Amino acid sequence: MSLKRNTIWNLAGAGLPLLLGAVTIPYLIKNIGVEAFGILTLVWALIGYFSLFDFGLGRALTQQVAAMLSARQYMQLPNLIKTGLWFTAVTGIIGGMILAALADQLAIHWLKVSVLLQPSTQKALIVAAIGIPLTTMTTGLRGILEAYEDFKVVNLLRIGLGAANFGLPALSVMFIGNSLIWMVVSLIAARAIVFFAHGWLVYRKLSDDWRASRFNKSTMRNLLSFSLWMTVSNIVSPLMVSADRFVISTVLGASMVAYYTVPFEVLIRILIVPGALTSVLFPRLAAVMATDWPEAKRLYRKSLKIIALALFPICILIALTSKWTMALWLGRDFSEISWPIVSIMAVGVLLNGLASLPFAAIQATGDARTTACLHILELAIYIPALFFCLKFFGLIGAAIAWSLRVGVDLIVLLICAKRRKL
Protein backbone atom coordinates (compact mmCIF):
# COMPACT_ATOMS: atom_id res chain seq x y z
CA MET A 1 0.00 0.00 0.00
CA SER A 2 1.16 3.54 -0.75
CA LEU A 3 3.10 5.25 2.03
CA LYS A 4 2.42 8.61 0.41
CA ARG A 5 -1.36 8.09 0.23
CA ASN A 6 -1.55 6.84 3.81
CA THR A 7 0.58 9.75 5.03
CA ILE A 8 -1.76 12.21 3.33
CA TRP A 9 -4.73 10.57 5.05
CA ASN A 10 -2.92 10.87 8.39
CA LEU A 11 -2.25 14.55 7.74
CA ALA A 12 -5.90 15.13 6.93
CA GLY A 13 -7.04 13.22 10.01
CA ALA A 14 -4.91 15.27 12.35
CA GLY A 15 -4.95 18.59 10.52
CA LEU A 16 -8.48 19.27 9.30
CA PRO A 17 -10.03 19.55 12.79
CA LEU A 18 -7.57 22.36 13.52
CA LEU A 19 -9.40 24.57 11.03
CA LEU A 20 -12.47 24.27 13.24
CA GLY A 21 -10.34 24.82 16.34
CA ALA A 22 -9.03 28.10 14.94
CA VAL A 23 -12.61 29.38 15.03
CA THR A 24 -13.97 27.76 18.19
CA ILE A 25 -11.04 28.43 20.55
CA PRO A 26 -11.42 32.25 20.46
CA TYR A 27 -15.20 31.80 20.78
CA LEU A 28 -14.83 29.61 23.87
CA ILE A 29 -12.28 31.90 25.53
CA LYS A 30 -14.56 34.89 24.95
CA ASN A 31 -17.70 33.21 26.27
CA ILE A 32 -16.52 31.00 29.14
CA GLY A 33 -13.41 32.90 30.21
CA VAL A 34 -9.70 32.13 30.25
CA GLU A 35 -9.75 30.04 33.45
CA ALA A 36 -12.69 27.84 32.41
CA PHE A 37 -11.09 27.25 29.02
CA GLY A 38 -7.84 26.37 30.77
CA ILE A 39 -9.74 23.77 32.80
CA LEU A 40 -11.25 22.37 29.59
CA THR A 41 -7.73 21.93 28.17
CA LEU A 42 -6.79 20.12 31.39
CA VAL A 43 -9.72 17.75 30.85
CA TRP A 44 -8.49 17.11 27.30
CA ALA A 45 -5.04 16.34 28.69
CA LEU A 46 -6.36 14.04 31.43
CA ILE A 47 -8.47 12.00 29.01
CA GLY A 48 -5.44 11.68 26.75
CA TYR A 49 -3.11 10.73 29.58
CA PHE A 50 -5.36 8.23 31.35
CA SER A 51 -6.08 6.60 27.99
CA LEU A 52 -2.54 5.27 28.32
CA PHE A 53 -4.05 2.62 30.56
CA ASP A 54 -4.14 0.57 27.37
CA PHE A 55 -0.54 -0.25 28.46
CA GLY A 56 0.86 0.07 24.97
CA LEU A 57 -1.46 -2.62 23.59
CA GLY A 58 -2.50 -0.41 20.68
CA ARG A 59 1.04 -0.32 19.29
CA ALA A 60 1.65 -3.94 20.26
CA LEU A 61 -1.47 -5.02 18.38
CA THR A 62 -0.33 -3.08 15.32
CA GLN A 63 3.03 -4.83 15.37
CA GLN A 64 1.77 -8.36 16.02
CA VAL A 65 -1.32 -8.22 13.79
CA ALA A 66 0.83 -6.86 10.96
CA ALA A 67 3.29 -9.72 11.48
CA MET A 68 0.49 -12.31 11.41
CA LEU A 69 -1.00 -10.80 8.27
CA SER A 70 2.43 -10.90 6.62
CA ALA A 71 2.82 -14.57 7.60
CA ARG A 72 -0.81 -15.32 6.54
CA GLN A 73 -1.66 -16.64 10.01
CA TYR A 74 -5.27 -15.54 9.70
CA MET A 75 -6.76 -18.17 12.00
CA GLN A 76 -4.82 -16.81 14.99
CA LEU A 77 -6.00 -13.21 14.55
CA PRO A 78 -9.37 -13.41 16.40
CA ASN A 79 -7.75 -14.85 19.51
CA LEU A 80 -5.00 -12.23 19.50
CA ILE A 81 -7.37 -9.34 18.93
CA LYS A 82 -9.98 -10.37 21.51
CA THR A 83 -7.29 -10.93 24.14
CA GLY A 84 -5.82 -7.49 23.53
CA LEU A 85 -9.19 -5.75 23.57
CA TRP A 86 -10.31 -7.43 26.81
CA PHE A 87 -7.12 -6.20 28.43
CA THR A 88 -7.65 -2.60 27.22
CA ALA A 89 -11.24 -2.69 28.51
CA VAL A 90 -10.27 -3.81 32.01
CA THR A 91 -7.33 -1.44 32.36
CA GLY A 92 -9.40 1.43 30.93
CA ILE A 93 -12.06 0.88 33.57
CA ILE A 94 -9.36 0.93 36.26
CA GLY A 95 -7.97 4.17 34.83
CA GLY A 96 -11.43 5.75 34.81
CA MET A 97 -12.01 4.76 38.43
CA ILE A 98 -8.70 6.34 39.45
CA LEU A 99 -9.54 9.62 37.69
CA ALA A 100 -13.01 9.66 39.30
CA ALA A 101 -11.47 9.05 42.73
CA LEU A 102 -9.01 11.92 42.22
CA ALA A 103 -11.61 14.38 40.91
CA ASP A 104 -12.21 15.99 44.29
CA GLN A 105 -8.52 16.53 45.07
CA LEU A 106 -7.79 17.79 41.56
CA ALA A 107 -10.64 20.29 41.52
CA ILE A 108 -10.35 21.64 45.05
CA HIS A 109 -6.67 21.39 45.97
CA TRP A 110 -4.14 20.42 43.31
CA LEU A 111 -5.10 22.60 40.35
CA LYS A 112 -5.78 25.83 42.28
CA VAL A 113 -9.15 26.32 40.61
CA SER A 114 -11.11 29.39 41.74
CA VAL A 115 -13.83 28.63 44.30
CA LEU A 116 -16.63 29.46 41.86
CA LEU A 117 -15.47 26.83 39.34
CA GLN A 118 -14.53 24.06 41.79
CA PRO A 119 -17.93 22.23 41.86
CA SER A 120 -18.32 22.16 38.08
CA THR A 121 -14.68 21.14 37.64
CA GLN A 122 -15.11 18.20 40.02
CA LYS A 123 -18.25 16.96 38.22
CA ALA A 124 -16.64 17.47 34.81
CA LEU A 125 -13.69 15.29 35.84
CA ILE A 126 -16.03 12.53 37.00
CA VAL A 127 -17.80 12.64 33.63
CA ALA A 128 -14.42 12.60 31.88
CA ALA A 129 -13.56 9.38 33.74
CA ILE A 130 -16.27 7.60 31.73
CA GLY A 131 -14.29 8.37 28.60
CA ILE A 132 -11.15 6.55 29.72
CA PRO A 133 -12.23 2.94 28.92
CA LEU A 134 -13.84 4.16 25.69
CA THR A 135 -10.54 5.73 24.69
CA THR A 136 -8.33 2.77 25.65
CA MET A 137 -10.48 0.33 23.69
CA THR A 138 -10.61 2.69 20.72
CA THR A 139 -6.81 2.86 20.80
CA GLY A 140 -6.61 -0.92 20.55
CA LEU A 141 -9.14 -1.03 17.71
CA ARG A 142 -7.29 1.71 15.86
CA GLY A 143 -4.04 -0.23 16.22
CA ILE A 144 -5.69 -3.22 14.54
CA LEU A 145 -6.95 -1.11 11.63
CA GLU A 146 -3.48 0.42 11.22
CA ALA A 147 -1.97 -3.06 11.05
CA TYR A 148 -4.25 -3.63 8.05
CA GLU A 149 -2.90 -0.27 6.74
CA ASP A 150 -6.50 0.92 6.51
CA PHE A 151 -5.54 4.51 7.19
CA LYS A 152 -8.40 6.01 5.20
CA VAL A 153 -11.16 4.86 7.55
CA VAL A 154 -8.98 5.44 10.62
CA ASN A 155 -8.51 9.07 9.67
CA LEU A 156 -12.10 9.68 8.63
CA LEU A 157 -13.00 8.71 12.18
CA ARG A 158 -10.16 10.81 13.55
CA ILE A 159 -11.47 13.82 11.63
CA GLY A 160 -14.88 13.28 13.17
CA LEU A 161 -13.50 12.99 16.69
CA GLY A 162 -11.19 15.97 16.24
CA ALA A 163 -14.05 18.10 14.96
CA ALA A 164 -16.13 17.00 17.94
CA ASN A 165 -13.36 17.92 20.41
CA PHE A 166 -13.34 21.50 19.13
CA GLY A 167 -16.90 21.90 17.89
CA LEU A 168 -19.11 20.24 20.50
CA PRO A 169 -17.99 22.44 23.44
CA ALA A 170 -18.76 25.50 21.32
CA LEU A 171 -22.19 24.12 20.38
CA SER A 172 -22.81 23.30 24.03
CA VAL A 173 -22.08 26.90 25.02
CA MET A 174 -24.22 28.17 22.15
CA PHE A 175 -27.34 26.12 22.93
CA ILE A 176 -27.07 25.12 26.61
CA GLY A 177 -24.90 27.79 28.23
CA ASN A 178 -21.50 28.14 29.86
CA SER A 179 -21.63 24.79 31.61
CA LEU A 180 -18.29 23.03 31.84
CA ILE A 181 -20.10 19.79 32.69
CA TRP A 182 -22.18 19.76 29.51
CA MET A 183 -19.11 20.55 27.43
CA VAL A 184 -17.38 17.46 28.80
CA VAL A 185 -20.55 15.35 28.40
CA SER A 186 -20.58 16.21 24.70
CA LEU A 187 -16.94 15.13 24.37
CA ILE A 188 -17.59 11.76 26.00
CA ALA A 189 -20.66 11.15 23.81
CA ALA A 190 -18.50 11.72 20.73
CA ARG A 191 -15.91 9.24 21.99
CA ALA A 192 -18.62 6.61 22.52
CA ILE A 193 -19.81 6.98 18.92
CA VAL A 194 -16.24 6.75 17.58
CA PHE A 195 -15.57 3.64 19.70
CA PHE A 196 -18.56 1.77 18.26
CA ALA A 197 -17.58 2.80 14.75
CA HIS A 198 -14.06 1.38 15.23
CA GLY A 199 -15.50 -1.82 16.67
CA TRP A 200 -17.80 -2.35 13.70
CA LEU A 201 -14.95 -1.82 11.22
CA VAL A 202 -12.70 -4.33 13.00
CA TYR A 203 -15.55 -6.85 13.25
CA ARG A 204 -16.03 -6.69 9.47
CA LYS A 205 -12.41 -7.66 8.88
CA LEU A 206 -12.51 -10.81 11.01
CA SER A 207 -13.79 -14.28 10.25
CA ASP A 208 -16.66 -16.00 12.06
CA ASP A 209 -14.07 -17.41 14.49
CA TRP A 210 -14.22 -14.02 16.26
CA ARG A 211 -17.26 -15.08 18.33
CA ALA A 212 -15.68 -18.36 19.42
CA SER A 213 -12.32 -16.87 20.40
CA ARG A 214 -11.46 -16.40 24.08
CA PHE A 215 -9.09 -14.47 26.29
CA ASN A 216 -5.79 -16.38 26.23
CA LYS A 217 -3.11 -16.00 28.91
CA SER A 218 -0.31 -17.16 26.62
CA THR A 219 -1.30 -14.65 23.97
CA MET A 220 -1.52 -11.95 26.62
CA ARG A 221 2.02 -12.72 27.80
CA ASN A 222 3.30 -12.40 24.24
CA LEU A 223 1.59 -9.04 23.85
CA LEU A 224 2.88 -7.78 27.19
CA SER A 225 6.44 -8.91 26.45
CA PHE A 226 6.44 -6.37 23.64
CA SER A 227 4.30 -3.69 25.24
CA LEU A 228 5.51 -3.41 28.85
CA TRP A 229 8.57 -1.31 28.06
CA MET A 230 6.55 0.58 25.48
CA THR A 231 4.01 1.23 28.22
CA VAL A 232 6.66 3.00 30.26
CA SER A 233 7.36 5.34 27.33
CA ASN A 234 3.65 5.76 26.67
CA ILE A 235 3.09 6.84 30.28
CA VAL A 236 6.19 8.94 30.83
CA SER A 237 6.29 10.70 27.45
CA PRO A 238 2.75 12.18 27.59
CA LEU A 239 3.39 13.03 31.23
CA MET A 240 6.29 15.21 30.10
CA VAL A 241 4.06 16.72 27.43
CA SER A 242 1.14 17.53 29.74
CA ALA A 243 2.87 17.93 33.13
CA ASP A 244 3.83 21.52 32.39
CA ARG A 245 0.22 22.76 32.46
CA PHE A 246 -0.42 21.08 35.83
CA VAL A 247 2.83 22.45 37.25
CA ILE A 248 1.89 25.90 35.92
CA SER A 249 -1.50 25.63 37.65
CA THR A 250 0.22 24.60 40.88
CA VAL A 251 2.92 27.29 40.80
CA LEU A 252 1.18 30.22 39.08
CA GLY A 253 -2.54 29.35 39.37
CA ALA A 254 -5.16 27.97 36.97
CA SER A 255 -5.81 31.46 35.56
CA MET A 256 -2.39 31.36 33.82
CA VAL A 257 -2.75 27.93 32.22
CA ALA A 258 -4.55 29.08 29.07
CA TYR A 259 -1.78 31.54 28.14
CA TYR A 260 0.54 28.56 27.86
CA THR A 261 -1.77 25.77 26.70
CA VAL A 262 -3.45 27.65 23.84
CA PRO A 263 -0.21 28.26 21.91
CA PHE A 264 1.10 24.86 22.98
CA GLU A 265 -2.02 23.04 21.73
CA VAL A 266 -1.73 24.83 18.39
CA LEU A 267 2.01 24.33 17.99
CA ILE A 268 1.96 20.69 19.02
CA ARG A 269 -0.41 20.08 16.11
CA ILE A 270 2.47 20.77 13.75
CA LEU A 271 3.74 17.37 14.85
CA ILE A 272 0.96 15.89 12.75
CA VAL A 273 3.47 16.19 9.89
CA PRO A 274 6.08 13.75 11.29
CA GLY A 275 3.36 11.82 13.12
CA ALA A 276 1.52 11.18 9.88
CA LEU A 277 4.64 9.67 8.35
CA THR A 278 5.92 7.70 11.35
CA SER A 279 2.58 6.02 12.09
CA VAL A 280 2.47 4.79 8.50
CA LEU A 281 6.15 3.88 8.54
CA PHE A 282 6.03 1.90 11.80
CA PRO A 283 4.24 -1.24 10.54
CA ARG A 284 6.21 -1.07 7.28
CA LEU A 285 9.57 -0.81 9.08
CA ALA A 286 8.63 -3.61 11.49
CA ALA A 287 8.09 -5.90 8.49
CA VAL A 288 11.03 -4.76 6.35
CA MET A 289 13.59 -4.93 9.16
CA ALA A 290 13.05 -8.68 9.40
CA THR A 291 13.83 -9.29 5.72
CA ASP A 292 15.68 -6.34 4.14
CA TRP A 293 17.76 -4.17 6.49
CA PRO A 294 19.28 -1.99 3.72
CA GLU A 295 15.75 -1.09 2.58
CA ALA A 296 14.79 -0.27 6.16
CA LYS A 297 17.87 1.97 6.45
CA ARG A 298 16.98 3.72 3.19
CA LEU A 299 13.39 4.32 4.32
CA TYR A 300 14.56 5.68 7.68
CA ARG A 301 17.09 8.15 6.27
CA LYS A 302 14.82 9.33 3.47
CA SER A 303 11.99 9.93 5.93
CA LEU A 304 14.26 11.87 8.30
CA LYS A 305 15.22 14.24 5.47
CA ILE A 306 11.58 14.69 4.48
CA ILE A 307 10.58 15.63 8.03
CA ALA A 308 13.45 18.12 8.35
CA LEU A 309 12.60 19.81 5.05
CA ALA A 310 8.90 19.97 5.94
CA LEU A 311 9.22 21.29 9.51
CA PHE A 312 12.12 23.75 9.30
CA PRO A 313 10.43 26.53 7.26
CA ILE A 314 7.14 26.15 9.15
CA CYS A 315 8.71 26.45 12.60
CA ILE A 316 11.03 29.31 11.70
CA LEU A 317 8.17 31.28 10.14
CA ILE A 318 6.04 30.77 13.27
CA ALA A 319 8.87 31.88 15.54
CA LEU A 320 9.45 35.08 13.55
CA THR A 321 5.78 36.09 13.21
CA SER A 322 4.42 34.91 16.57
CA LYS A 323 3.66 38.34 18.03
CA TRP A 324 1.68 39.50 15.02
CA THR A 325 -0.24 36.25 14.48
CA MET A 326 -1.20 35.81 18.16
CA ALA A 327 -2.46 39.42 18.35
CA LEU A 328 -4.50 38.92 15.18
CA TRP A 329 -5.98 35.64 16.42
CA LEU A 330 -6.59 36.17 20.14
CA GLY A 331 -6.08 39.89 20.71
CA ARG A 332 -3.25 42.11 21.90
CA ASP A 333 -3.67 41.43 25.64
CA PHE A 334 -3.43 37.66 25.19
CA SER A 335 -0.59 38.02 22.70
CA GLU A 336 1.59 40.13 25.02
CA ILE A 337 1.87 37.21 27.42
CA SER A 338 1.91 34.28 25.02
CA TRP A 339 3.94 35.32 21.95
CA PRO A 340 7.41 34.73 23.51
CA ILE A 341 6.20 31.25 24.47
CA VAL A 342 5.24 30.59 20.86
CA SER A 343 8.66 31.67 19.55
CA ILE A 344 10.58 29.43 21.96
CA MET A 345 8.32 26.44 21.54
CA ALA A 346 8.42 26.64 17.74
CA VAL A 347 12.08 25.64 17.96
CA GLY A 348 11.20 22.84 20.38
CA VAL A 349 8.52 21.54 18.01
CA LEU A 350 11.11 21.28 15.22
CA LEU A 351 13.41 19.23 17.46
CA ASN A 352 10.56 17.07 18.75
CA GLY A 353 9.31 16.38 15.24
CA LEU A 354 12.73 15.15 14.14
CA ALA A 355 12.96 12.91 17.21
CA SER A 356 9.75 11.07 16.32
CA LEU A 357 11.43 9.13 13.53
CA PRO A 358 14.39 7.56 15.40
CA PHE A 359 11.94 6.87 18.24
CA ALA A 360 9.63 4.90 15.91
CA ALA A 361 12.54 3.17 14.17
CA ILE A 362 14.06 1.94 17.44
CA GLN A 363 10.71 0.53 18.59
CA ALA A 364 10.14 -1.08 15.19
CA THR A 365 13.24 -3.20 15.85
CA GLY A 366 11.40 -4.63 18.87
CA ASP A 367 13.44 -2.54 21.32
CA ALA A 368 11.06 -0.54 23.49
CA ARG A 369 13.39 -0.73 26.50
CA THR A 370 15.84 1.89 25.21
CA THR A 371 13.17 4.53 24.62
CA ALA A 372 11.53 3.76 27.97
CA CYS A 373 14.77 4.14 29.93
CA LEU A 374 15.53 7.38 28.10
CA HIS A 375 12.14 8.83 28.98
CA ILE A 376 12.46 7.85 32.64
CA LEU A 377 15.80 9.66 32.82
CA GLU A 378 14.38 12.69 31.03
CA LEU A 379 11.41 12.88 33.41
CA ALA A 380 13.69 12.80 36.45
CA ILE A 381 15.56 15.81 35.08
CA TYR A 382 12.69 17.68 33.40
CA ILE A 383 10.24 18.07 36.32
CA PRO A 384 12.74 19.75 38.70
CA ALA A 385 14.01 21.89 35.81
CA LEU A 386 10.41 22.90 35.03
CA PHE A 387 9.76 24.03 38.62
CA PHE A 388 13.05 25.93 38.62
CA CYS A 389 12.39 27.70 35.31
CA LEU A 390 8.81 28.57 36.29
CA LYS A 391 9.95 30.08 39.56
CA PHE A 392 12.62 32.29 38.02
CA PHE A 393 11.30 32.96 34.50
CA GLY A 394 7.52 32.47 34.72
CA LEU A 395 5.63 31.07 31.75
CA ILE A 396 8.59 31.65 29.44
CA GLY A 397 10.61 29.35 31.68
CA ALA A 398 8.16 26.50 31.02
CA ALA A 399 8.69 26.90 27.27
CA ILE A 400 12.48 26.95 27.74
CA ALA A 401 12.46 23.80 29.89
CA TRP A 402 10.27 21.90 27.41
CA SER A 403 12.35 22.91 24.38
CA LEU A 404 15.62 21.93 26.06
CA ARG A 405 14.15 18.58 27.04
CA VAL A 406 13.06 17.66 23.51
CA GLY A 407 16.45 18.80 22.18
CA VAL A 408 18.28 16.37 24.45
CA ASP A 409 15.77 13.68 23.50
CA LEU A 410 16.55 14.14 19.79
CA ILE A 411 20.31 13.92 20.26
CA VAL A 412 20.18 10.71 22.30
CA LEU A 413 17.67 9.01 19.98
CA LEU A 414 19.78 9.80 16.90
CA ILE A 415 22.82 8.28 18.61
CA CYS A 416 20.83 5.14 19.54
CA ALA A 417 19.53 4.77 15.98
CA LYS A 418 23.01 5.17 14.55
CA ARG A 419 24.31 2.39 16.80
CA ARG A 420 21.70 0.14 15.21
CA LYS A 421 23.24 0.98 11.82
CA LEU A 422 20.27 3.05 10.67
Image (cartoon, rainbow, N blue to C red):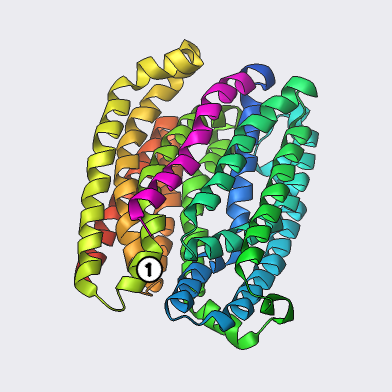
| Residue 22 horizontal/vertical position (percent) | 51, 25
Magenta highlight on residue 10: yes
Magenta highlight on residue 15: yes
Q: Residue at x 77, y 28 (%)?
A: 179
Q: Nearest the camera: 59 or 316?
A: 59
On-image quarter of the C terminus? bottom left
Above or below — where is 149 with respect to 120? below
- 72 to the left or right of 221: left
Q: Residue at x 40, y 57 (%)?
A: 280
| Residue 319 horizontal/vertical position (percent) | 30, 27
Above or below — where is 146 with respect to 253? below
**In terms of secondary structure, what is the magenta stretch mainly?**
helix
Q: Which residue is label 1 attached to?
A: 363
Other-residue count near label 1 (Cα within 10 Å), few / some / many at <14 / 14–19 / ≥20: many
Q: Residue at x 43, y 81 (%)?
A: 71
Above or below — where is 12 with respect to 419? above
Residue lying furthest bottom: 218
Q: Residue at x 77, y 45 (%)?
A: 127
Q: Residue 359 appears in which quarter of the rendering?
A: bottom left
Q: Residue 30 appears in which quarter of the rendering?
A: top right
Q: What amino acid is labelled 1 in the image?
A: Gln
- 21 to the left or right of 192: left
Above or below — where is 38 with respect to 153? above
On-image quarter of the N terminus? bottom left
Q: Nearest the camera: 379 or 239?
A: 239
Residue 137 shows in this picture: yes
Q: Secondary structure at mark 1?
A: helix
| Residue 151 horizontal/vertical position (percent) | 48, 54
Residue 422 shows in this picture: no
| Residue 173 horizontal/vertical position (percent) | 73, 23
- 241 to the left or right of 164: left
Magenta span covers which residues? Answer: 1-29
